[in-house]
Image (cartoon, grey):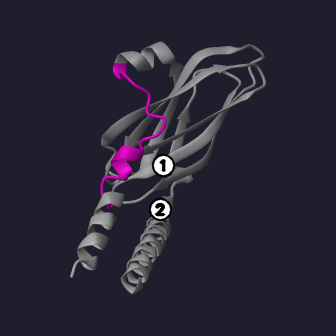
């Protein structure tokens, strides 16, 4: 019975360690993001469309973009997408992301967010385009990209395997 209590303590300890280390890692990564909202150039060819950014934050190797599009045109916008071109500090185009906005009724908002893993991003150019044009250039919209950002995390089964190995005599 005493060995069962030891095993239970080790399991609880490793569970607490797992969540604590994930929390600390998330806070450390979040502290490395640098706000670059001043480096966004909005290129909109539709009069009366407001594109605003709540967040454009970058680290050395990844970043995130979040914002909204408001339709002040008086007419519904059908099947629109947002194209974001990312540039380095030397004005080299590093990559492009497309975000599907769908249909935006007159006077309504449509939110967008994406994450990217491009290196050395300094500025971005944003275009409002038709969704059909975006599909020709990119077969899928990148609304959220968790797999690219989670590759370096330790999976749960590695923690369980480590706990079992530690408990072996």
* Residue located at (31% from left, 53% from top): 151
- State the residue position of label 1: 64
Q: SS at mark 2?
A: loop
In the rendered image, the quadrant that contains the C terminus is bottom left
Is residue 51 visible in the rendered image? The answer is: no
Magenta residues span 137-155
x, y percent for residue 48 = 71, 24
Q: Earlier in the sequence, mark 2 or mark 1?
A: 2
x, y percent for residue 35 = 53, 58
Q: State whether the magenta stretch is mostly helix, strand or loop.
A: loop
Neighbour tally class for label 1: few under 14, some 14-19, many 20 plus, Cα within 10 Å: some
Q: Residue 165 falls in which quadrant of the image?
A: bottom left
Is residue 120 visible in the rendered image? The answer is: yes
Residue 27 badge? none
* Residue located at (44% from left, 15% from top): 133
- Near-viewer residue (99 or 7): 7
In the rendered image, the quadrant that contains the N terminus is bottom left
């Amino acid at each position: 019975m005493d060995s069962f209590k030891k095993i239970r303590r080790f399991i609880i300890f490793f569970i607490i360690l797992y969540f604590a280390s994930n929390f600390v890692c998330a806070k450390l990564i979040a502290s490395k993001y640098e706000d670059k909202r001043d480096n966004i150039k909005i290129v909109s060819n539709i009069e009366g469309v407001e594109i605003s950014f709540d967040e454009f934050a970058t680290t050395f190797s990844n970043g995130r973009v979040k914002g909204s599009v408001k339709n002040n045109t008086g007419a519904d916008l059908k099947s629109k997408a947002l194209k974001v071109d990312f540039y380095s500090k030397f004005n080299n185009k590093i990559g492009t992301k497309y975000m599907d906005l769908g249909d935006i009724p007159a006077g309504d908002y449509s939110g967008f967010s994406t994450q990217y893993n491009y290196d050395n991003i300094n500025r971005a150019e944003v275009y409002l385009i038709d969704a059909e044009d975006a599909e020709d250039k990119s077969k899928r919209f990148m609304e959220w990209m968790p797999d690219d950002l989670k590759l370096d995390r330790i999976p749960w089964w590695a923690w369980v395997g480590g706990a079992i190995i530690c408990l072996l005599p």
